[in-house]
Each structure stands twice: as C-alpha cells, then as structure tokens.
Image: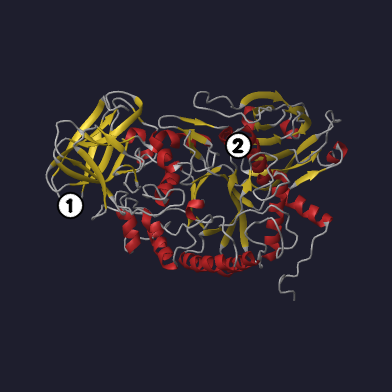
Amino acid sequence: MNQTNPLNIKRPNALLYLATLAALTSIVAVPAWSTIAESAPAAAPRSGRSIVVLDQVIGRTPTSIAVGLEDVNHEIYGGIYSQMIFGEAFAEPERSPGISAHWRASGGGLDTSYSLVATAPFKGKQSQRIERVGGDTWAGIENRGLNRQGLSIVAGKSYEGKIVLRSTQPISVRLSFQSADGKTIYGQQVLQVTSGEWKTLDFGLMPSQNDRHARFAIETRMAGAVDVGYVLVQPGAWGRYKNLPVRADVAAAMERQGLQAIRFGGCANGGCGDVSDYKWKSMIGDPVQRPITRGFWYPQESNGFGIFEFLQLGEALGIEAVPSLNIDESAADIRDLMDYLYGSANTRWGAQRIADGHPQPYKVRRIQLGNEEAVDEAYYAKFEALAETIWAYDRDIRLVVGDFTFEDVIEDPFSFTGARKIKSLAAHQKLLQLAAKWNAEIDFDVHLWTRNIQDPGRIRKEGNLHGQILALDSYASSLRALAPGGARFKVVVFELNANSHDLDRALANAYAITALQRRPYIDLISSANGLQVDGQNDNGWDQGLIFMDQGKVWVQPPYHVHRMIAGSQRANVLKIDINGHDEQVEATAFQDAAGISLHLVNTAKDAIAYDIDFGRRAAGADVDVTMIGNDRGTALNTASNPENIAPETSTFKLDGDGRATYELPQRSFTTMQITWRNR
C-alpha cells in the first residue's frame, strides 16, 4: 500500500469532480428553460436566464448569522466590556515619568511625585504610587479610557466602581469625573484609606453634566503616599446589558443583528504566536483578583472579560456561544474545566463556578481547541489528549478542530498546495478516527477571505472567492473519503476574514454565506471580528460589523447583510435550478410552514434579469424584497452618516403561475420573501 496515501485515493477526473460538486451544493445548472419545465411547468423565457425554486428540501439551514469576538480592535476593552478604564491594573510600563502608560498626572503641583512600585504589588509586577509632600489642592493621576479618547458620561446616571488602595498612614483619596482640562468636577466621592494592606473599596459617582470626553481622576491633597492596585469604573445597571459587564448599547445592536451564535477566539488563543498565558483558570473568580497575564494583542492582559463573561453573554442573548481554548492547556486543567462548566456543588470546580455567581451549569455544547493551527501530528497529539478527557466526561460535546485555510482544490489529500501550514490531511484522518472511536461528532474550522468577491485568499495571488469555495468543497469531499464508517463530522467557517468593513466586503460575505448555506456539510458560518472601536484600529484588522465610540453605536454594510438574512431565511433549504448561473451570481432558497424565501447575490458590474419561478403554490403572491448594494463599491457608514449604506425595500407580485421577471441590481444582495399568511 502507498504509505503516503494509505487510502490509495486516485486523482478524480473532471466529470466526477463536477458531479460531486453538484451533489454538495444541490444547485443544478441547466441548458434551457424547456429542460426546467420537466420539473416545473414554465412560460416562455423573457430574460434568457431563469431560476426555479423546487418544492424539494435538501437539508436544514445552517447557523448563518454569527460573529467572532476577540481581544483585537479593542473589541473587548473599549468595546463591549463595560469597564471604562483602559489600563486598570497599572501593568503597563511608564510613559510619563513614574506613571503607568495609560494614565497621566492630574492637578499639577511640584509637591507630587509618582513611581511604579514592585514591592508587594497588588497583582502583576507593579502598582502605582502617588506621593504628596503637602499642599491644599487635589493632585494625582487621570485616565481617559481607550487610547485616551475620553470617557462618555451621562448627567444624572449612576456609575459604580471598585478601587484597590493601600497606605502606610491614614489618607483621603478623591475619585471624580472631570472635564478634559480638569477645571470642572462633574461628580466625586472621597474615600478614607486607613490600612497598610491592600483593601478593595466600592464607590459610586453621578455626573452633573454630559460629556463625551471626560476623564476619571484618583487624587489626594494630603502629605503621604497612596498605592493604587486596580480600578473599575462602569455604568450602573442602566448602562449594562442584563446586569452583565457588557455595554447595553453594543449588546442591543447584537440583538438587532439577529445573531444565532458567537465565537470567542482567534489569535488571542492560538495559531499566531506565543499565547501560553491564555488559560481558562486566569479568567475565573472576581475580576479584581484575576492575574495579569501576557497577551497576544496586548503585552499585558487583565482578564476582566474572558471566556465565562462571553458564555454569559451568549446565555443572555439566547444564542450558542462557542469558546475556543488554548490547544496547549493541560489535560488535567481541561478535566477541571469540565467540572467548572457542568459540575455540581459537590465538585471542587463546580463549587467554584457557583461561588463565581453562576449556580446553574453552563450549556455550552461545542468547544474549539486552538485556532488557525498547523493540523499535523503535533496538533493531533495535543488534541487527542484533550479530546479524550472531554469525551470521557461527555461524548456529546462537539469538539472543533482549529484548522486554517485551503485555497487550492485538493485532488490528493496527502499531497496538495494552498494550505500554508500543511500539505497533507493525514492528521485529519487520525482526528476522524478518534471521533469515530468515541462515537462523537467533530467539526473542522476553515477560514475564508472575503475582502471582496475577487479575493483569492491569503496565500494565492490569483483567483477569487468562488475558487476558495471550490477548494472548501474539495476539502469536505476529502474528509468524507478519509473518514471511517460511522464517523460524524461537519465543517464550520468561524471566520469570514477581511481587512475592510465596506459594501464590497458586505457583498463578499453575502456571496460566501449564500453559497455555503446550500452545502450540507456546513454547520455554522461566522464573520470575524464582529466589533470595532472607531478610530482605534491599532491592531491591524479593519473589519468590524458593529462600530462604536465611547458613547455611540452604529453599524456597517456587512451587519445589514446579517439582518437581511435573519429576517428572511427559513428552517429548510430548497433545491433550485438555475439557467445562466455563473460564478458572479449565487442563490439559495428556503422554506418553512410560513412561506418561501430566495436569496440572490449579483456581483457583476451590470444588472442581470432572471425569470424567477416559485411554483404554482405561490400563484399571485406578493413578494417582499430587501436589497443592499446597487454598485456603491467601497461605501461605508460613519458616526456622522450612519445610514449611508442601508437596505432598501420594495414589493412585486407573481403571476398566476407563481412567476415573474426580476432584474437584480448591479453588485447587490437581494432577499425575497413570500409569506403564506399574507396571501
């Protein structure tokens, strides 16, 4: 037997490949309308192109409206996390003399000095010291939030916080919201520090004025020194989503998006560099006490928002939340995680979860191991150790392989190009065998690049998104060939990746989602980096769907694509026949008891007319249409013009046979709905 190709799989011929592709996608290109008429009677064609929606279910609709969250683009700090302070644990090295980087001196005065103290710091390697010789004015340090863009405060609203202080002598410390120049105090509270040991103190502030560019100050006016170890400032319950440490306005936008799933992962937890400090045990307990760790996107991580805040957000939204774990977690720690997620009060880690404020077990049923990894023998060995620990606990937990990209069609699964990190699916075969051994289901996460419809992928210089999807088809086909009997697997696309958030990217996302929805091997499709803080993109990616600043939220064209899909897709995918179908157009139809929907993406620079046949069951029906695009290229939405790109709605009526001719606008995404109850 060929040792490099143990299944002795032959290179497929072209006809076999096309037949396999048709079976995968359940879309049939036919040569003429008269041929379609054998399946559904049709009138003479008017446009020369036709789409027939057949009354034949080919599968369930995959989870298609999902986003990833990651500590990138400040999606967490300055983004969805309700913590207003950036640099809350004073872990960053000084930028101003003696002051941790995200803070500055306030109040002035020659009698004030600053230093970063490493002797018995509250946590990490250092804490902040403010020392006064004397004086009758307040002076200390101030923080203006993410990259010092300013804090947005609302008059008459409560803000709450915690601060960790120590002093060798009694001292008064004033906490306040101030104007950017420090001349106006909007609200203040004075705390008394009486202990030489670290103490956590609660405080509250209520601003007297609105200000989008305020600052928060920690000051004293007495002789002596005070050390600051940590500070939290956040809106009261009025500004948080369901009492979570989550900005209410951001979560509300996620609700409106129609999300079905969220994923927490990315380079922060694997695949891009050293993330050895990314461990779940650093993310439990009181955030005040969580350790400072080394991060990927930030040199220092305070872990205030981590895996379990993410899972609680998913619970509050009522959707699936998929955590991604570091593949280098130990099997022992993963066994502890099982008890933390699901265990009773009789287990050590179940009791810890309850003490952390989550009395009921978590409901997470899918866990990813790693992200964008080289899926090779080394990865397999790590995956096997963790998977056997997890499946021994509960084999119904679906584990996700943290794979990467496949940009060339795979003809030989043991020798191919276009995958950047690997050239063989030998480790994938072992993963499939492992899942079959445990009678468990396994997912494989593959990422696509959707900068625009011409995006060839991260590696290739030539090609397009259509070519990436064909490569994904060949990947799935290869996995089926490698899988032992009884093996159960799906492919998930956890990242539709780009470096843009404009209309081009929206249409590429729509194209990818529409194409993948027809493929039975796909279980979940997610856009990467769902959030982005405006003007603070100092991590490189520029692909947020929801944009925000310190006080406002608005959305980008790819977000509208999600809303359109959420508003029109139905539970079952229908087979469709297309005449005149090419790679510039994608279409998928859906059905449930309430009606039929059709999604159409036209990436061409010209409008294209189609004769559309919904069947006689839709005779005379009104069709509700929503469209975004019409060739506005790289247009996007801004804080000053948040509705620059938004969907447009219209209606048309089908004839007595359930047909109509419709012109798809150039470079557009269109959804059509027929609702039976409205007929």
- What's the residue type where badge 1 is placed? Glu
Q: Quadrant of the C terminus?
A: top right
Toward the bottom, the furthest residue is 1
Secondary element under disc 2, as helix, strand or loop, is helix
Q: Is residue 399 left or right of residue 421?
A: left
Q: Residues within 10 Å of mark 2 (few under 14, many from 20)?
A: many
Question: In this picture, is 233 found above or below 195?
Answer: above
- What's the residue type where badge 2 is placed? Ile
Q: Quadrant of the N terminus?
A: bottom right
Question: In this picture, is 258 found above or below 298?
Answer: above
Mark 2 to mark 1 CA distance (whole Å): 56 Å
Dividing the picture into quadrants, the one containing residue 631 is top right
- Residue 594 can be seen in this image: no
Question: In this picture, is 369 found above or below 48?
Answer: below
Q: Is residue 201 left or right of residue 400?
A: left
Toward the front, the furthest residue is 110
Residue placed under numbered mark 1 in the picture: 197
How far across and how far down the image is residue 551, in percent?
40, 30
How far across and how far down the image is residue 77, in percent?
41, 42
How far across and how far down the image is residue 499, in percent?
58, 40
Indicate the colouring scheme.
secondary structure
Q: Residue at x 75, y 35 (%)?
A: 615
Residue placed under numbered mark 2 in the picture: 565
How far across and how far down the image is residue 294, in percent?
40, 54
